[in-house]
Image (spheres, rainbow, N blue to C red):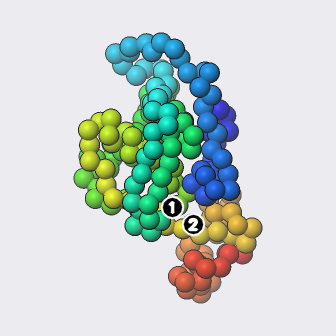
């Protein structure tokens, strides 16, 4: 469970090359308490085990994920009284009437979770486009948390956009 909450995540989107940690079914509560306010409690979203979530991605084509196999229950409200990432982005996309979401390919499985939330809330989801990640010479995605070069640094070094997408950044 601790591993599931850490970053960075597998850049494959949770399937090829790495398996996303699955919340143990044995730890699921057998009885859900009815709460009137989210104060101080993490609220999980229980995924419908075995449900296939499919969507068309502008770059990746047809993407399929299976709830309970490729991803499991996830937190939608945190103990510190803030919406967790999945709920926050779904709420923002809906409130801002976003028509297309463009993000990294490492978030393909997150999109499946978000589609379940859009459905549960009765909202129409946007279209999705998941772009390949820019990686360093070791194959790791560029990230501030690892001290990677910023795209502006790569641009200043004279790299073309095609080079950024086709060769590792040293």
Query: Who comes first in sequence, dot 1 or dot 2?
Result: 1
> Would you say the residues marked 1 and 2 are in contact, meaning their CB atoms lie under 8 Å apart?
yes
In the image, residue 62 above or below residue 113: below
In the displayed structure, 123 sits above or below 138; it is: above
Tell me which residue sits at (65%, 79%) in the image: 167
Q: Which residue is mark 2?
A: 133
Q: Is residue 67 visible?
A: yes
Q: Determine which residue is flagged by label 1.
A: 104
Q: Secondary structure at mark 1?
A: strand
The percent position of residue 52, horizontal first and vertical second, equals 45, 44
Q: Name the residue nearer the viewer: 15 or 81.
A: 15
Local packing at callout 2 (Cα closer than 10 Å; few below 14, some 14-19, many 20+) is some
Residue 23 image point, x, y percent: 60, 31
Q: Residue at x 42, y 51 (%)?
A: 54
Q: Name the residue located 61 percent from the left edge and 36 percent from the top edge.
A: 22
Expressed as whole percent of the image width and height from the top left, the position of residue 34 reads: 38, 13
In which quadrant of the rendered image does the C terminus lie?
A: bottom right
Q: Is residue 156 visible?
A: no
Quadrant of residue 12 in the image? Answer: bottom right
Picture quadrant of residue 90: top left
Determine crowd level at label 1: few under 14, some 14-19, many 20+ residues with C-alpha closer than 10 A. some
Q: Compared to 106, does 33 lie above or below?
A: above
Cα distance between the residues tagged 1 and 2: 6 Å
Q: Secondary structure at mark 2?
A: loop
Instruction: Give the left or right position of residue 159, taking residue 117 as reference.
Output: right
Q: Residue 130: x, y in percent?
A: 47, 63
């Amino acid at each position: 469970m601790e591993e599931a909450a850490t970053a960075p995540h597998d850049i494959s989107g949770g399937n090829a090359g790495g398996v996303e940690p699955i919340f143990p079914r044995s730890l699921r509560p057998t009885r859900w308490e009815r709460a009137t306010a989210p104060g101080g409690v993490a609220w999980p979203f229980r995924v419908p085990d075995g449900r296939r979530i499919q969507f068309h991605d502008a770059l990746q084509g047809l993407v399929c994920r299976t709830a309970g196999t490729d991803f499991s229950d996830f937190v939608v409200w945190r103990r510190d009284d803030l919406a967790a990432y999945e709920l926050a982005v779904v709420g923002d996309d809906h409130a801002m009437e976003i028509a297309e979401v463009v993000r990294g390919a490492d978030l393909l499985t997150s999109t499946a979770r978000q589609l379940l939330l859009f459905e549960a809330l009765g909202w129409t989801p946007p279209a999705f486009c998941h772009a390949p990640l820019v990686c360093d010479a070791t194959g790791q995605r560029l990230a501030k948390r690892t001290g990677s070069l910023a795209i502006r640094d790569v641009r200043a070094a004279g790299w073309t956009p095609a080079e950024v997408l086709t060769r590792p950044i040293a």
